[in-house]
């Protein structure tokens, strides 16, 4: 089947103008959108620029807007994006575009790092692993699935308009440790999230939950962090 890709192009080294280009490629219904992008780059226009690595939905590097929705190109099948019409492909929103489908991820990772995304403990280094019951593990298991693709954060209307907002992923990253029974940095993370640009900026639109390619209940996690702030203070 022939599939037409309508791709947003931008190269600041050539022009500050944004343009849309259409390329038609022959694909199988079960091919991925990433396969179609590869065909354009390898056979039609080698200057097309986008990120990808594992191509199996693990690295999260190929998040982009496909037909107006944040998705991983490597997990989105051609047959699922209405291939009878041109398939629009553009960079995720809310982050500076560097070239074509590539955005500057540093603001996203700055927010991620600000949540202290590591186990915080005190005392001497243990001589054995820190044990945890299955029940305690289940408390935060969902948010351990995050692959840092930024699909949730860049689907958030608040994030689009407020460059200071931490965004859904940062809150998910904090949730993973706030509810970890082995961690001792909960108060510190909650204090960070209690900022005016923190968890209270969420408007519960569920865009983030819909966008997550790993099926994380992002909005639920954000609400749990809000409750933790209310009842622990």
Image (spheres, helix red, strand yellow):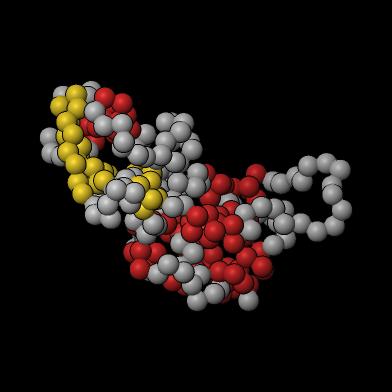
* Residue 179 rendering spot, x and y as whole percentages: 62, 57
- Return the residue nearer the eye: 173 or 100: 100
- Return the residue nearer the eye: 4 or 149: 4
Is 146 positioned to the left or the right of 82 in the image? right
Give the position of the C terminus as an image quadrant: bottom right
The residue at 26%/32% (across/down) is 45
Is 177 positioned to the left or the right of 30 in the image? right
- How many labels were placed on the picture? 0
Can the viewer see residue 202? no
In the rendered image, the residue lying farthest to the front is 14
* Residue 191 rendering spot, x and y as whole percentages: 62, 72
* Residue 103 rendering spot, x and y as whole percentages: 40, 50
* Residue 173 rendering spot, x and y as whole percentages: 55, 55
The residue at 36%/53% (across/down) is 97
Vertical position of residue 39 compared to residue 168: above or below: above
Can the viewer see residue 123? yes
The residue at 80%/59% (across/down) is 122
- Return the residue nearer the eye: 232 or 55: 55
Vertical position of residue 119 compared to residue 166: above or below: above
Vertical position of residue 73 compared to residue 106: above or below: above
- Return the residue nearer the eye: 142 or 145: 145
Q: Quadrant of residue 7?
A: top left
Give the position of the N terminus as an image quadrant: top left
């Amino acid at each position: 089947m022939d599939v037409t890709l309508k791709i947003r192009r931008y190269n600041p080294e050539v022009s500050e103008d944004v343009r849309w280009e259409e390329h038609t490629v022959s694909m199988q219904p079960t091919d991925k959108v990433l396969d179609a992008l590869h065909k354009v780059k390898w056979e039609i226009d080698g200057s097309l620029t986008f990120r990808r690595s594992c191509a199996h939905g693990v690295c999260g590097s190929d998040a982009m807007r496909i037909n107006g929705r944040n998705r991983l190109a490597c997990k989105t099948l051609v047959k699922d994006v209405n291939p009878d019409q041109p398939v629009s492909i553009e960079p995720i929103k809310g982050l500076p575009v560097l070239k074509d489908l590539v955005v500057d991820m540093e603001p996203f990772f700055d927010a991620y790092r600000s949540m202290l995304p590591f186990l915080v403990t005190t005392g001497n280094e243990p001589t054995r692993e820190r044990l945890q019951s299955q029940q305690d593990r289940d408390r935060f298991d969902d948010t351990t699935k995050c692959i840092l693709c930024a699909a949730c954060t860049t689907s958030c209307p608040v994030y689009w308009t407020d460059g200071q907002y931490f965004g859904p992923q940062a809150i998910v990253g904090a949730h993973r440790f706030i509810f970890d029974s082995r961690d001792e940095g909960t108060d510190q993370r909650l204090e960070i999230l209690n900022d005016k640009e923190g968890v209270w900026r969420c408007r519960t639109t569920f865009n983030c939950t819909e966008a997550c390619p790993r099926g994380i209940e992002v909005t639920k996690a954000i609400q749990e962090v809000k409750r933790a702030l209310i009842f622990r203070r």
